[in-house]
Amino acid sequence: MTAGRIEAGAGARSLTAADVPVPVAPPVLPALAPFVAGGVLTAAEGRLAERLGRIGGEDQPQVLLAAALALRGPRYGHVCVELDRIAAHVAVEPQPRGRQGTDAGPQEVASLPWPATEEWREVLSASPLVRSVSGAATPLVLDGTRLYLDRYWQYEQRLAAALEARAVAWEDGPAAPAASVVAWLDELFGPARDLDRQRLAAAVALTRRLTVIAGGPGTGKTYTVARVLALLHRAALATSTDRPLRVVLVAPTGKAAARLQESLREALGALTLPAPVRAAMERTPASTIHRLLGVTRASSTRFRHDARHPVPYDVVIVDEASMVSLPLMAKLVDAVDDRSRLILLGDRDQLASVEAGAVFGDICGPAGSRPTLRFSPGAASALAAVVGGHLAGEHEVADRPGIWDAIVRLDRFRRFSSGSDLGAVAAAIQASGTEVDRAVELLRVPSPAGPETVPGAAARLLDPDEDPAAARTVTDFVVDRYAEVARLAVAGAPAGEVLAQLASLRVLCARRRGPDGVEDWNRRIERRLTEGVPGFDPSRRFYVGRPILITRNDDAVRLYNGDVGVIVEDADQPGQLVAAFWTPEAGVRTISPARLPACETTFAMTIHKSQGSQFAEVVIVLTPEPSPVLTRELVYTAITRASQRATVLGRAEILRTALSRPVQRASGLQHRLWRGAEPASPGG
């Protein structure tokens, strides 16, 4: 046989794909096949569970199904499998085009051959792959009706124990005389006339080793933490001359850490502080969580700092805590010394981590508990010494110390007035279990302009079903705004000007691919700008006016996942291109495109990627058809990225469905922290 041809008697034919043997993946067991066909499992997950069964000597179909579900869980953000709930709440895996199978809906998924819960538990309890919480090491752990992969069970129980220990470990009164603390609080927050939750948060931080400050954008978390730090520094200086308090600001992304540091420095301008306190606060470093913990060369998930080698800080402040996954939060809390203070800032209503867990939401407790304050008698007594009688009657009294003693929920939107569209929409979405229709109507009919904190702040819905020109109207608006970015860049305007114009607007999409996804909108905008802006040429990878989003951390060049920049001509070397970024320390900094870590074009970005960012205006693009991607948290996160205006492009019914669908992540952390937390009585 000659190369590339098959001899067949006197004739010959060319070698085709049909002549090349293709390895065929073995089929999954019949017991798992319906769950693969229905999109609940992938074939790879089924085969991995079967392999686990062969290694462990297990062939019971119910056990292999549970193992496959436990393996798939982290991919959807789940920490465990809730055996009694999964049939009703599992998300299906959409089938790619051309693949056999069905895109099963809720009814089809519920009709799959799910085992009965009690029978399932009994079979799992007898399996060599599964142990109870106190058994010998096995790949799976059964804790009540929750089944975990061993490592996730370890993370969860370790984190719960550490948080609870911190929450109940309160100082025997403030670290300084109560009269001094009251005077400092009056200087920082003004004299107390009623219960000020920001002032209360500062008092909690002074008396606790764990403080959780929860609230939406514009509720004053940064304002509060600046004053918390000032209070802690003053107390430390008043009670010890040993050394100044060592404080670090951390966040899941470099962008979020830098923004917190910048906000803290801005807040300092409004504070009258003793020189040593001001100097200490100005020196506060910012870091990503990974940098703080010290990533090792051997593994990106193993760190130099842990419980045996804690980080060298007295106070660790974590911003955007809702973005932190269960494994990372467990490792972070391990690495904070037991004698140090840990302060978590976040918004429980935002999207949770893209990885497993909804840690911040679980810490904050059942959704129905917002925005209630709850303290045990001991905690309330310690706080009353510095906040006076204003706490009486404003909280529920818990019958024992617990995580609730560390939590202060900020419940007033201060960025927007009570009459602003954005503030009203955000509040309605937070309560959208009962106010879905109100949230949709507020977007449909923006309120008249009024005396708002941000003049003209507005939120509106453009529904293609009601206005066939809605998509064209939004596209024209977006292109006109980005055209100004392109013109400035092409004209050689200062990089700071280009960056400022770029930051004024962002298109936020629910998904990356598909119609009305990020890739679709980026192509659409590039095409329109090419037609309308002379000199704008996106034919090269790095072109003048290209906005870029960093997608991978790179300590060597100090650029991190989530950083946004723009390609401009180098002011010092005409003809050379540089990527320009804004930094709080140095203003605009530039770097050669050749040194950039992984990045992508970002006229549009996913709503997930927008977490931790803020823009004057956002355009939010929903999917044109119902999608499991669209949830209440996704819409809330998108709306609250705007400081002035939010425009939603999508069908009202799609929006209403999204607001009625909260993210449901299987986890046992909330149960561990809040079990038996019914209030004993109103405080008084």
Image (cartoon, rainbow, N blue to C red):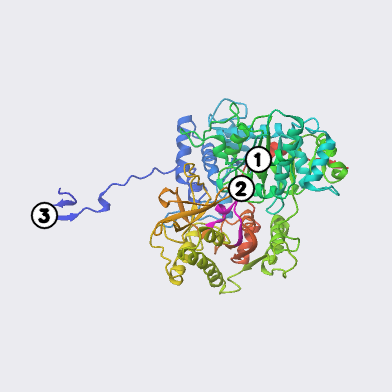
| First in sequence: mark 1 vs mark 3 | 3
Quadrant in the picture for the C terminus: top right
Q: How many marks?
A: 3
Which of the marked residues, 1 or 2, is nearer the chain's N terminus? Answer: 1
Residue 631 located within the stretch drawn in magenta: no
Quarter residue 98 falls in: bottom left
Tell me which label, 3 or 2, sits earlier in the chain.
Answer: 3
The residue lying at 66 percent from left, 57 percent from top is 660
What is the spatial separation of the Cα atoms under label 1 and label 3, in whole angstroms?
81 Å
Q: Quadrant of residue 114?
A: top right
- Secondary structure beneath disc 2? loop
Mark 1, mark 3: which one is toward the viewer?
1
Mark 1 vs mark 2: give the one in front: 1
Answer with left or right where residue 638 lies relative to residue 95. Answer: right
- Identity, as a three-letter code, of the amino acid under mark 3: Ala
Q: Which residues are magenta?
A: 605-617
The type of residue carrying mark 2 is Ala
In the picture of the structure, the residue carrying the numbered disc 2 is: 352
Q: Nearer the viewer, mark 3 or mark 2?
A: 2
Left or right placement of residue 606 versus residue 401 in this view:
left
- State how far apart marks 1 and 2 are (Cα): 18 Å
Q: Under tag 3, what secondary structure?
A: loop
Residue 317: mark: 1
**x%, y% of residue 392?**
87, 43
